[in-house]
Amino acid sequence: MKKPLNERFQELAGIKPLSELEDSPTDKFESKKLHPTEVFTDEELDMVGGVLDDIFKKLNINTDYGRDDLQTYTQEDQNKVDALGDFIDGYFETLGGTY
């Protein structure tokens, strides 16, 4: 049976199919998403909240920030929050995680 052209090119380039790759080192970790209060103490969460408040002030993002939600006042503020979230996700991906 003939292989699809892209598989043949990958084979010629020395790229293994995903099915042949060894398990990732992070595969041993359970992927259950935990609530922040299950991972951090109240003091740690307060510290993170303070850091986020500082970041929002420095980036001129106007918010009504609570522990469980984030309300922005304008579409521009919401765009900034969304872009910041994407940036942070990308940062953690560069550290080797899959978030």
Image (cartoon, rainbow, N blue to C red):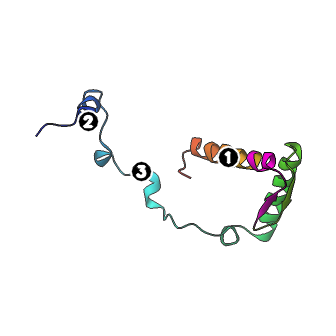
Work out whether mark 2 precedes mark 3 in sequence or the reverse, and give the earlier one.
2
Question: x%, y% of residue 11?
Answer: 25, 32
* Point 83% across, 47% down: residue: 55
Quote the CA–CA distance across marks 2 and 3: 22 Å
Which is more N-terminal, label 3 or label 1?
3
Quadrant of the drawing holding the N terminus: top left
10 versus 18 height, above or below: above
Name the residue located 67 percent from the left edge and 46 percent from the top edge. 88
Residue 15, given in percent of the width and then of the height, sits at: 31, 34
Q: What segment is highlighted magenta in the picture? A: 69-79
Q: In the rendered view, does 60 fall on the left or right side of 3?
A: right
Instruction: Name the residue rendered at 48%, 61% in the picture.
Output: 29
Residue annotated with mark 2: 7
Disc 1 + disc 3, Cβ < 8 Å: no
Which structural element holds mark 2?
helix
Quadrant position of residue 13: top left
